[in-house]
């Protein structure tokens, strides 16, 4: 039986464990032939796999694994139901999340509930691999228990490496606990070691993400030429990792018109944030890529803007919210307050010049991330803070250097 996916078709076989849990094998190519097979044992995670929850990175890992197997043309992703919540089930996992909201890490949360930190067993998974003809694997995981479980049941694990994902500020703690407390190992083996690239770590660039009661943590991110003019920023991994770490990315209507950005995460493995467009008169073209359905979008507009246009956007799944006008277009403070009320904890403001200037002038920026484009004399006007005259002091500097790129970041101190 074939299941067609966005990554291509997978031959599918299903097995049922003695406890009644279906194991779904998504197979590409001839996995019974000689040579280790690229493989992932994926523990069910309804919140991450289906809903894209940002508390973990399971959904991103699952899709990345399917993509890698498809790219290689040979391999298997074994989807293990019954392993939800590391084997304690969905209800207990959600109870463990409540414990985590009260300060426990992912291990202690289970223990506080009187449950083991991990109740999974991989014997059945090994038997399924055996049944489809797999004898040796290159395992996409850095959980040593998975490798041991396979080896103990007759499957050779010839190499092993994690599927690196870009951390989100909401799962950074979870990922570090897995590394520090759950014995997850560094990649080993020649073949697989060169496959995954280390994820771009932008946590120091972002600083301490601390939302306030009345607005999210606001990060301003743009590129400038060495002589201080705003520069266009070609899509690069750092800027995509910044998006992947944020709850929302915000731009003005001019940027949508001029650059037609998608504002999604594509160059690193990570989830796309909510896209927010400030468009006071709803003049952006309906064909703009930011309205496509590959991520969620909310448009903020002035009261009384084109009602038909708003209705059309809503019908296509784009949120439209009316806001009062401020000194420089829409009242940015009101927009941020509304986003916070919707649960957004961090916003990455990417431009354009008008929005950047207005955010600085309004004193709502917590962190500034400036990429230095290696050029002089190009670019458009410099950042203009309009009427704001008070100096903003910058502290807690971080410098990120990769190849030709120099990126600097600071906390913005309020006068
Ligand atoms: N109990 C509990 N389970 C969780 C939590 N977060 C994720 N899970 C479950 O953990 C399982 C995923 O396992 P991970 O520990 O993320 O990764 P792994 O599969 O052991 O290791 P890798 O193969 O390297 O990804 C899924 O079943 C999730 O539902 C949590 O906070 N508490
Ligand atoms: Zn998960």
Image (cartoon, grey):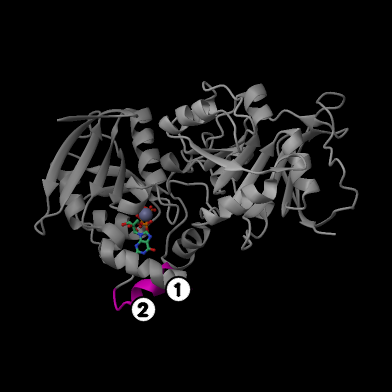
Q: Residue at x 41, y 44 (%)?
A: 60
Question: Quick one: which residue is furthest to the front in this view?
Answer: 304
Closest to the observer, 131 or 204: 204
Front-lying residue, 67 or 323: 323
Residue bounds of the magenta highlight:
102-115
Which quadrant of the rendered structure holds the N terminus?
top left
Observer-nearest of 71 and 203: 203
Mark 2 C-beta to ligand 1 under 8 Å? no
Q: What residue sits right under mark 1 in the picture?
A: 104
Q: Residue under circle 2? A: 112
Graded by Cα atoms within 10 Å as few (under 14), some (14 to 19) or many (20 or more), the crowding at tag 2 reads few
- The mark tally for this picture is 2
The spot of residue 350 in percent (x, y) is 67, 38
Q: Is residue 65 left or right of residue 323?
A: left
In the rendered view, would you say 327 is above or below 179?
above
**Hey, which quadrant is residue 131 in on the image?**
top left
In percent of width and height, residue 13 lies at 15, 38
Ligand 1 image position (quadrant): bottom left
């Amino acid at each position: 039986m074939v299941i067609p996916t966005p990554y291509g078709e997978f031959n599918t076989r299903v097995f049922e464990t003695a406890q009644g849990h279906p194991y779904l094998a998504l197979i590409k190519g001839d996995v019974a032939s000689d040579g280790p097979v690229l493989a992932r044992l994926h523990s069910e995670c309804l919140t991450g796999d289906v809903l894209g929850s940002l508390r973990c990175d399971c959904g991103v890992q699952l899709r990345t694994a399917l993509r890698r197997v498809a790219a290689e043309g040979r391999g298997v992703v074994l989807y293990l139901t019954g392993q939800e919540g590391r084997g304690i089930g969905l209800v207990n996992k959600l109870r463990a999340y409540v414990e985590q909201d009260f300060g426990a890490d992912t291990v202690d949360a289970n223990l506080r509930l009187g449950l083991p930190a991990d109740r999974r067993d991989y014997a059945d998974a090994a038997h399924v691999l055996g049944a489809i003809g797999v004898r040796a694997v290159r395992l996409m995981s850095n959980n040593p228990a998975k490798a041991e479980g396979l080896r103990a049941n007759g499957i050779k694990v010839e190499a092993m490496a994690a599927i690196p994902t870009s951390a989100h500020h909401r799962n950074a703690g979870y990922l570090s606990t897995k590394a520090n407390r759950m014995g997850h190992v560094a990649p080993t083996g020649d073949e697989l070691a060169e496959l995954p690239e280390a994820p771009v770590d932008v946590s120091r660039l972002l600083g301490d993400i601390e939302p306030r009661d009345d607005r999210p943590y606001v990060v301003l991110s743009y590129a400038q030429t060495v002589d201080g003019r705003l520069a266009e920023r070609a899509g690069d991994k750092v800027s995509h990792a910044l998006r992947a770490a944020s709850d929302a990315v915000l731009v003005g209507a001019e940027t949508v018109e001029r650059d037609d950005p998608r504002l999604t995460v594509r160059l690193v493995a990570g989830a796309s944030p909510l896209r927010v467009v400030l468009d006071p008169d709803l003049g952006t073209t309906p064909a703009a890529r930011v309205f496509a359905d590959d991520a969620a979008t909310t448009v903020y507009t002035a009261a009384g803007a084109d009602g038909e246009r708003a209705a059309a956007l809503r019908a296509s799944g784009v949120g439209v919210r009316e806001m009062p006008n401020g000194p420089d277009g829409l009242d940015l403070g009101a927009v941020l307050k509304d986003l916070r009320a919707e649960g957004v904890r961090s916003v990455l403001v990417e431009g354009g010049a008008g929005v950047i200037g207005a955010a600085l002038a309004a004193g709502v920026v917590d962190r500034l991330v400036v990429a230095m484009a290696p050029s002089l004399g190009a670019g458009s006007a410099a950042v203009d803070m309009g009427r704001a005259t008070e100096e903003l002091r910058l502290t807690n500097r971080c410098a990120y250097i990769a190849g030709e790129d120099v990126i600097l970041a600071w906390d913005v101190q309020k006068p």
